[in-house]
């Protein structure tokens, strides 16, 4: 029986690997430092390495999978994109909490079945955590609510 390989997924994995290699090359131009005192090149090289590792794992998964998977499912792509757009549009106009709530609620529509209680609980938890970490912890000048 002839195996059918999803070449679209293979190409996507290869692009991810190329992006990882590019990040590694660019990051290696900076000082790496050590684990105790990381330099500015350490984090980009690590992120690039993780991207390359994910690309290899994706190619292996596609190569060894028996059935071809549907790569184009519009609902998750559209709802996740809408969540990011809503977050970007609301952050300065409405504040961190409404932007986070909109992001989480829109992204929660990506999966079937939609679980509204879990989505609201996640939105509340991430909003509180976001305010504590970014506003109070890091002192980033963004307000929780912009009324």
Image (spheres, rainbow, N blue to C red):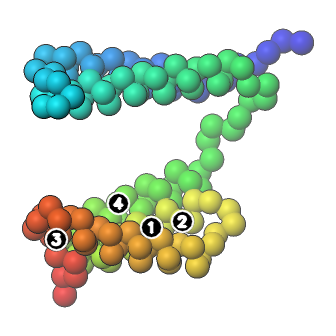
Label 2 vs label 1: CA separation? 6 Å
Q: Which mark sits nearer the N-terminus, 3 or 2?
A: 2
Report which residue position mark 3 lands on: 136
Q: Residue furthest front?
A: 36
Q: Which mark sits nearer the N-terminus, 3 or 4?
A: 4
Q: Residues within 10 Å of mark 2 (few under 14, many from 20)?
A: many
Label 3 vs label 2: CA separation? 27 Å
Q: Do the residues under discs 3 and 4 have CB atoms within 8 angstroms? A: no
Label 4 vs label 2: CA separation? 15 Å
Q: Residue at x 17, y 31 (%)?
A: 36
In this rendered view, identify the residue nearer to me: 44 or 92. 44
* Figure check: 35 above or below 83: above
Of badges 3 and 4, the one in the foreground is: 3
Mark 2 lies on a secondary structure that is: helix
Label 4 vs label 1: CA separation? 12 Å
In screen coordinates, is 16 left or right of 22? right
* Figure check: 66 above or below 110: above
In screen coordinates, is 74 left or right of 121? right
Split into 4 quadrants, where in the image is the C terminus? bottom left
Report which residue position mark 4 lands on: 85
């Amino acid at each position: 029986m002839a195996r059918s390989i999803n070449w679209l997924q293979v190409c996507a994995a290869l692009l991810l690997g190329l992006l990882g290699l590019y990040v590694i090359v660019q990051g290696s131009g900076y000082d790496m430092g050590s684990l105790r005192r990381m330099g500015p090149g350490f984090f980009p090289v690590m992120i690039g390495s993780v991207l390359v590792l994910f690309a290899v794992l994706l190619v292996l998964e596609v190569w060894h999978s028996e059935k071809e998977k549907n790569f184009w499912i519009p609902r998750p792509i559209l709802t996740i994109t809408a969540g990011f757009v809503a977050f970007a549009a609301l952050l300065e106009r409405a504040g961190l909490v409404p932007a986070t709530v909109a992001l989480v609620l829109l992204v929660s529509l990506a999966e079937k079945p939609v679980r509204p209680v879990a989505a609201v609980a996640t939105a509340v938890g991430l909003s509180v955590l976001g305010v504590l970490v970014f506003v109070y912890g890091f002192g980033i000048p963004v307000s929780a609510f912009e009324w």
